[in-house]
Image (cartoon, grey):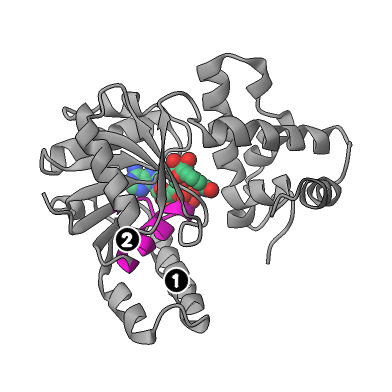
Amino acid sequence: MTIRTIGVVGAGTMGNGIAQVFAQAGYTVRLVDIAQPMLDRAALGIDKSLAKFVEKGKLTADARDAVLARLTFANALDYLAEVDFVVEAIVENAEVKRDLFGRLDALTRPDVILSSNTSSISITLLGAATRRPDKVLGMHFMNPVPLMTLVELIRGQSTSDESMQTAIGLCTALGKNGVEAADYPGFIANRILMPMLNEAFFAVMEGVGTPEAIDAVMKGGMNHPMGPLTLADFIGLDVCLAILNVLHEGLGDPKYRPCPLLRRMVAAGHLGRKSGRGFYTYA
Ligand SMILES: NC(=O)c1ccc[n+]([C@@H]2O[C@H](COP(=O)([O-])OP(=O)(O)OC[C@H]3O[C@@H](n4cnc5c(N)ncnc54)[C@H](O)[C@@H]3O)[C@@H](O)[C@H]2O)c1
């Protein structure tokens, strides 16, 4: 099957970037979310991001218009009935994702691959919610999607070689590098990243340093491009907490226990950049 139309579910931090890069690579993209305000916000975000590419001379104004013409939005899942490939990028919650995968399975053609952008949740578990577990895989894009070249590709217990090859081909078409990881909690990226971010949360909680000091040490001392607390705000503190919960529950090791300060901030609605307040405040 030739893949022409991509369905993206979830228009939050990741979904709008994923939709944008597929449209920039020449695919027709249908972006769906349950929340109309998120779709409106995604449309604005994509406009802004493309404008930056035009400003920098990396995209012509005509090419930008063509990208925008390939992108459409809807708040009903039925809009994805005719797509050739799906990327799911909704909230990091296994039950909500499993319910969606069941509905996508009923809605889309049986030969369509259903991929998830999950940061940590078992691809095997999502595949088991469908009648096509061989066509379910993880396609874990990095934030911000238009700039980051890595895609972690996760093979579930039943994912076929053919499905993996299709995903690798799509990464190449997007100009990105697909790296395969096995289906264990957090895969490679978050198995390694999240314990570091969690340690930075504990360091704030225990008064080891201010967020500014901790970020300055990791940037200047370790040559990280962004400090861990700035990065956590960028990812979304709710997303960090959801990932740490999956790591803690799935691996059983207390070293993944989410920091109580993180739990408290999420409970207060301080989710980082997207809510305007996290370890830092945003206009
Ligand atoms: N934020 C990051 O840096 C990052 C990086 C890589 C992967 N991820 C993963 O990507 C996924 C999305 O994360 P995000 O940060 O974009 O989240 P987000 O909270 O910014 O957006 C989630 C979106 O999903 C929508 N949604 C929720 N339930 C839905 C449903 N049933 N149907 C349709 N839409 C629904 C919400 O309205 C919201 O717009 C998660 O699995 C997350 O772990 C996030």
Q: Residue furthest bottom?
A: 61
Position of residue 168 measured from the top left corner of the image (x, y, whole percent): 31, 45
Residue at 62%, 43% (x, y): give it: 237
Mark 1 Cα within 10 Å, few/some/many (few <14, many 20+)? few
Where, quadrant-wise, is the C terminus in this rendering?
A: bottom right
Find out whether residue 58 is within the magenta segment.
no
User: Disc 2 versus disc 1: distance between alpha carbons?
Assistant: 17 Å
* Secondary element type, mark 2: helix
Range covered by the magenta-colored residues: 8-24
Residue under the point 39% across and 46% down: 89
Residue of label 2: 22
The earlier-in-sequence mark between 2 and 1 is 2
Quadrant of residue 267 within the rendered picture: top right
- What residue lies at 16% left-to-right and 27% top-to-bottom? 131
Tell which of 21 and 13 is nearer to you. Answer: 21
Q: Secondary structure at mark 1?
A: helix
Residue 207 coordinates in the image, percent (x, y): 89, 37
Label for residue 230? none
Q: Residues within 10 Å of mark 2 (few under 14, many from 20)?
A: many
Secondary structure that dominates the magenta span: helix
In the picture shown, does residue 218 fall above or below 13?
above
Q: Is mark 1 within 8 Å of ligand 1?
A: no
Is residue 15 highlighted in magenta?
yes
Residue located beneath label 1 in the image: 44
Q: Nearer the viewer, mark 2 or mark 1?
A: 2
Please provide percent x and percent y for residue 167: 29, 44
